[in-house]
Amino acid sequence: MSKRGFGIPPKASPDVIAARNALADKVCRELERGGLPVHRGDVEGDSSPETSGTRVHVDPSTGGGVFVEWRTGEDLRAAAVEILERGDFSSIPSALRHYETVVQCMADALAGILASAGFEVEGADPYTHGRAVFVKGIHA
């Protein structure tokens, strides 16, 4: 019998994860300096409705990194989820359009703010990280 994995990607080395955590801490400081509410989703968790605002997350997989995304307020997030759960996309309701617009505008703003602060950023893979911003590092 052969062993099969469950598609769980291998973790990066402890040194790589430590470097990502240090980068995430710098990202948080710069966003806080800009006046944005920031929390570490990988450290603080995401289950509370109070976790709206900027979410910084370290993906510990070998292909991971530091990701930054905007979380809308609970009311708007819940409205969008409810629409998606119904699965009727014949006409896109204004609440879902508004949610998508807010998330996209904030992703663009976060990328611009982080680039201005000296970080190397690019859009993340939308299939695994949605509209998150991928922080590659700091410009030398």
Image (tube, rainbow, N blue to C red):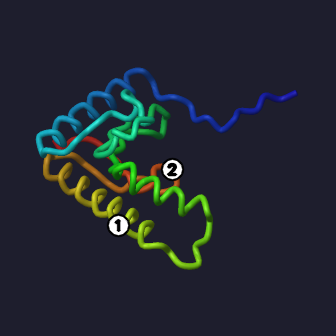
Q: Which percent across, then down, holds residue 82?
A: 54, 58
Q: Which percent across, then down, holds residue 91?
A: 53, 78
- Residue furthest front in the image: 75
Q: Is residue 135 left or right of residue 7?
A: left
Between 112 and 38, the residue placed more toward the observer is: 38
Between 60 and 34, the residue placed more toward the observer is: 34
Q: Residues within 10 Å of mark 1 (few under 14, many from 20)?
A: few
Please report the residue visible at 18 percent of the width from the left and 42 percent of the height from the top.
Answer: 31
Quadrant that contains the C terminus: top left
Disc nearer the start of the sequence (1/2): 1
The amino acid type of the residue labelled 1 equals: Thr
Q: Compared with residue 8, is residue 118 higher up or lower down, i.e. above or below?
A: below
Please report the residue visible at 51 percent of the width from the left and 56 percent of the height from the top.
Answer: 81
Q: Which percent across, then down, holds residue 20?
A: 33, 31
- Residue furthest bottom in the image: 91
Please report the residue visible at 32 percent of the width from the left and 62 percent of the height from the top.
Answer: 102
The quadrant holding residue 130 is: bottom left
Q: Is residue 90 left or right of residue 2?
A: left
Helix, strand or loop under label 1: helix
Q: Which percent across, then down, holds residue 63?
A: 48, 40
- Residue that carries the numbered disc 2 in the rendered image: 128
Q: Residues within 10 Å of mark 2 (few under 14, many from 20)?
A: few
Mark 1 and mark 2 in contact? Answer it, CB < 8 Å.
Answer: no
Q: Compared with residue 29, is residue 83 higher up or lower down, i.e. above or below?
A: below
Between 111 and 13, the residue placed more toward the observer is: 111
- Residue that carries the numbered disc 1 in the rendered image: 101
